[in-house]
Amino acid sequence: MTERTFPGIEEHPDILALRARSERVTTSVTAQICEGLGLLAGLYLAASAWIVGFDATLPTLAVTNLIAGLAYAFLMGGGFGSAYERTHAMSWAAAGIGVWTVIAPFVVSGARSSHPAAEVVSNAVVGGLAVILAAITGLLARRAKGRT
């Protein structure tokens, strides 16, 4: 009697279709630009305290920006490159990091009477950009999901 062999899960038609869809999304110019800008925004956020110069005056915010920036760069820069669809379908997490970036100077620095303008502007600009890039990424994933 001959033994029947079945193909592995990696050859399942649904898995192949998901991979093809993810490949279509990631090869679009818009997705590549969005990922690249997201990576740069995250790296800037991580280093912003030293670039702008508030690392000595607000060390807690510097650490917060470092952690948030690295997390954002990891999420948006394709840290989970093989799981594009799952990662980018959850772009709400990256958008949350962007919102946190905007409000962090006021939350982390406590009840200061004044905030250095460079710190607030830097966080507001990169946080707003982070939210926009996360929204674009989420829309791209949703649009690709609707096509199949």
Image (spheres, helix red, strand yellow):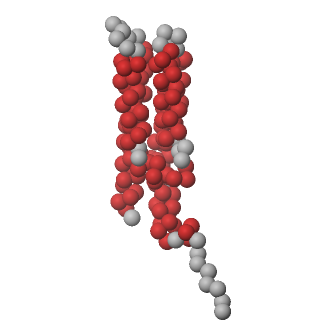
Q: Image quadrant for the C terminus?
A: bottom left
- Nearest the viewer among 2 and 103 is 2
- Nearest the viewer among 147 and 109 is 109
Q: Where is residue 56 in the image (x, y as percent from the top left)?
A: 53, 10
Is 51 left, or right, of 90 in this rendering?
right
Q: Position of residue 130 (x, y in %)?
A: 41, 34
Q: Which residue lies furthest to the bottom in this view?
A: 1
Tell me the quarter of the picture where residue 114 sits. top left
- Nearest the viewer among 106 and 46 is 106
* Image position of 145 with respect to 62: above or below: below
Q: Which residue is drawn at 55% across and 53% down?
A: 82
Q: Which residue lies furthest to the top in this view?
A: 113
Q: Can residue 53 be seen in this view?
A: no
- Count of numbered tags: 0
Q: Residue at x 41, y 44 (%)?
A: 91
* Image position of 123 with respect to 136: above or below: above
Q: Where is residue 14 in the image (x, y as percent from the top left)?
A: 47, 68
Q: Residue at x 46, y 48 (%)?
A: 87
Q: Residue at x 41, y 19 (%)?
A: 108
* Image position of 29 with respect to 114: above or below: below
Is 2 left, or right, of 92 in this rendering?
right
Q: Position of residue 123 (x, y in %)?
A: 41, 23
Q: Image quadrant for the N terminus?
A: bottom right
Q: Is residue 84 visible?
A: yes
